[in-house]
Amino acid sequence: MAETRTVETKINLSEKDIPKRWYNITADFKTPMKPPLNPGTKQVLSAQDLAAIFPDSLIEQEVSTQRWIDIPQEVLDVYSMWRPTPLFRAHRLEKAIGTPAKIYYKYEGTSPAGSHKPNTAVPQAFYNKQAGIKRLATETGAGQWGSALSFACTLFDLECLVYMVMVSYDQKPYRRSLMQVWGSDVIPSPSNSTQSGRSILEMDPDSPGSLGIAISEAVEDAATHNDTNYALGSVLNHVLLHQTVIGQEAKQQLDLVGDYPDVVIGCCGGGSNFGGLAFPFLADKMDGSKDFRAVAVEPSACPTLTKGKLAYDFGDTAKLTPLVYMHTLGHDFIPPQIHAGGLRYHGVAPLISHLLKEGLIESLDVSQVEIFHAAITFAQSEGILPAPESAHAIRGAIAEAIRCRETGESKTILFALSGHGHFDLSAYDNYLGGRLEDYVMPDEDVAKALASLPQI
């Protein structure tokens, strides 16, 4: 039996309870996903097509249909620096809302990088080191992923180059500083360092950048250096696989207090945080042993799941990445400059898209101003300052709790608090000063963005 402390508010596990395997949700799908395609030939992607930028071990995980994949001991040793992470019962938030619902949140902000991202950064750095790679190139939006990979590369003695989306590079200078403290080179994207970056700057010298553009730069960098591989912080199967330690721990923690969620909520950009929490619970839903709702919450300024189209699309602006079947707003889409930089991505993980298509999850889009209002409510009741990305999940949870207040239902709500917002205080300053703009993507702009989808 796992150790329990102050069960009423904070539910802890001991180090021996860290999951020893990752859960691969593809093993439980009733209908298969559409395969990724080679961007040049449009034929089904082969493992060899990925060998230029990924080590064999990650390619094997990307295409695996094995239900459980063992976590290497070297990775577990690093996980033990912050895992298991705590699960909290949000008594004060419940009281502030006046709801009969029980609200729990799984807090990933206790990692060295302050978010859930090291859960995949560490194994990716480990497998690349094992393969003899010297350097990793990546992109980052808000800087959560870039700082996590910088941390992991330091541990495994790898060089790290981060292309940081231009608007976030300016908005979040201290995340940039954190990456540099861990030894990474950080370049604002689009940049003059790559052909894809130069092409964007020729068309728009004042481009705010996007994750699609930064991915293009990082992939190009990796493909043109023999000692370099590419690392991605979301979207791909192996990335979401690594994040399932979150949901596995949450299931153990709720079991300790005899509870199970009626609603599971996570913010969703590429999908790693939402998938990491929800996938282990969705295993129960798919085998018929449990029934609950899973809600992916995204920004109204970048409504990939709620307004995007399910289609084959490139994962990057320069069309260097494989074509994947996902909900997308089009690879040329440049999202508005919202502060939740980690959610400014034109597509979403194929795994998440498949679950939505099969009716196993729901999507919800919320505006920038309302998520900061929810974040303030949460911080004033629970004491933790959330990242703007995480505040989307908080907004979704509060909306559910208010519905319970209105109907009198006593539901159990679980959400992912994916990271703290200590480096996002400028955004809070803008909100508190009434300077924060709201963005809602008009339908005509969505239609325009989708016009560039490849014809498959």
Image (cartoon, rainbow, N blue to C red):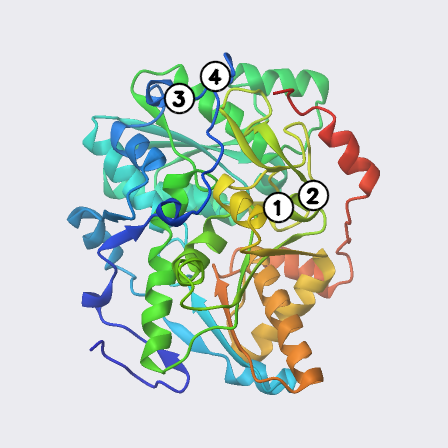
Q: Position of residue 295 (x, y in %)?
A: 58, 60
- Within 10 Å of the Cα at label 2, are there few (<14), some (14-19), or many (20+) other Cα atoms? some
Q: Residue furthest top?
A: 41
Circle 2 SS class: loop
Residue lying at 56% horizontally and 51% vertically, measured from the top left: 268
Q: Alpha-carbon distance for marks 4 and 3?
A: 23 Å
Label 4 or label 3, whichever lies nearer to me, is 4
Q: From the viewer's perspective, is residue 384 above or below residue 226?
A: below
Instruction: Name the one closer to the observer, 220 or 201.
Output: 220
Q: In which quadrant of the rendered image does the C terminus lie? A: top right
Q: Which residue is mark 4?
A: 43
Instruction: Name the one closer to the observer, 440 or 412.
Output: 412
Q: Which residue is mark 2?
A: 337
Residue lying at 57% horizontally and 23% vertically, measured from the top left: 191
Disc 2 + disc 3, Cβ < 8 Å = no
Q: Which residue is mark 3?
A: 222
